[in-house]
Amino acid sequence: MGNYNFNKKISRKGTHSAKWKKTSNTLPMPLIPLSVADMDIPLPEKTINLLNEFTDKGIYGYTLLSDNWGETVAQWMQRHYHWYVDAEHVVFCPRVIQAVSLYIQNFTAPGDGIVSLAPAYHPISHSVVVNQRRLLESELRYQHGCYAIDFDDLEEKFKQARCFILLSPHNPTGTVWEKESLKKIASLAEKHHVFIISDDVHADFIFSHHQHQVISSISAYVEQNSFICTSPAKTFNMAGLEVANIIIANEQHRKKFIHCLEAAGIHNPGYYAVPAFLSVYHDCDDWLFALKNYLAENRAWVINMLSEHFPDWVVTRSTGTYMLWVNYQASHLSEDQLKHWFLNRAGVEMSWGSGFGESGIGFFRINIATPRDTLAEALERIISTSPYAHQE
């Protein structure tokens, strides 16, 4: 096991980062974004060194997938999830949201119902609506700081649906679906002939002794009627390199999806995608193990700080993703008031609950995958500018 310095601060200025975008000069201090779901932690050093070698060649031409691409994916799934995947079932697609949109456009028809769980990751919901399909949201039950699926409501939605988009673990709540819940989903899908797209991009960040459970591994029906969407993007902070792998066991569906990719002009991976992907999936398990330990400490630290200074806020009791989903409803602040406090007074940006739909109002999402000193500065700003500071 190597020694890794996850505390190192790296300026992302000048990188056109979506997370660290330019902000108004009217803010009281430089903005700290704890919003967009990418990390402020660099790739493993061995991967960076390899990419530097590719940079030094100075020629950035068209590239092809490596011959061992599918087998590399299969080995990762077996090693980390104990899930057997046939290498032939792996289909490269730059981004998961592209795969979701291509499925919607080519496997469903305008007006078809597509189910998702609410609160919902906005790009998924948007891909349904912008493609003129009916978004059927099944609202999760929220009780005592936890979320659970309302299976009666989900079945009602399945009766009207062609497809169900599952986020596993769930974004934004961080809920890790237990095997029994996945079995119920699979059973309802088979009963009502619903296809499942499972977005598993956060699967490598489960902060418990539970192992990620892939829904297609527990149901023969789902195995043949699903796209399982995986990616190293979240795991190794390489979203900008655009690497995703869609696992499609059914040959007919797989051939059709490959045709859809070709028709959309999606073929060659980016120049850095292949070496980065092969490096992280072959050689960086120890880095990931160390990172998860670091992020687990970040989670515990942030939860403790919020509990101490804002005891009426409730951090959702979840074990997935490197985000925390915080309920501030007991403070009786509107979202506009919270944003004014965080942004205009503290200079800290979160992902605001309304961006995840109506059931997200009264919550915010905080990204803890950043050096601890950055987290500390952000929370100190929030605490010091709190409208409740005089009460402490």
Image: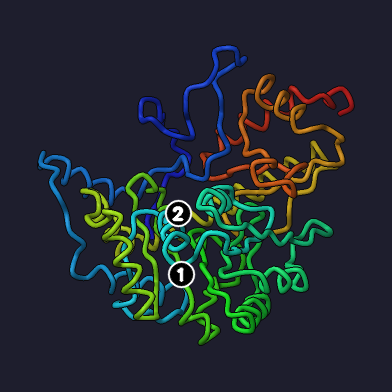
Q: Residue at x 43, y 58 (%)?
A: 288
Q: Tell me where residue 268 sits by quadrant.
A: bottom left
Residue displayed at 53% across by 74% down: 195
Residue 197, x across and y down, in percent: 51, 67
Which amino acid, by three-letter code, is at mark 2?
Ile
User: The disc labelled 1 sits on which kind of residue?
Assistant: Ile
- Report the front residue among 102 and 327: 102
Quarter occupied by residue 256: bottom left
Q: Check disc 2 and report its element: helix, strand or loop.
A: helix
Classify residue 50 as left or right of residue 213: left
Q: From this viewpoint, is residue 168 visible?
A: no
Q: Is residue 215 above or below residue 197?
A: below
Residue 323 vs residue 261, the one in the foreground:
261
Foreground mark, 1 or 2? 2
Residue 265 is at least partly visible in this image: yes
Residue that mark 2 sits on:
97
**Distance CA(mark 1)–CA(mark 2):** 12 Å
Q: How is the image coloured?
A: rainbow
Q: How many marks?
A: 2
Q: Nearer the viewer, residue 319 or 198?
A: 198
- The quadrant in which the N terminus is found is bottom left
- Residue 328 picture quarter: top right
Please indicate whether residue 379 sits to the left or right of residue 96 in the image: right
Instruction: State if disc 2 and disc 1 touch (CB < 8 Å).
Output: no
Q: Name the residue furthest top.
A: 26
Residue with the mark numbered 1: 228
Image location of residue 298, percent across then percent down: 60, 47
Can you give x and y, in whole percent of width and height, for residue 388 in the image?
85, 27
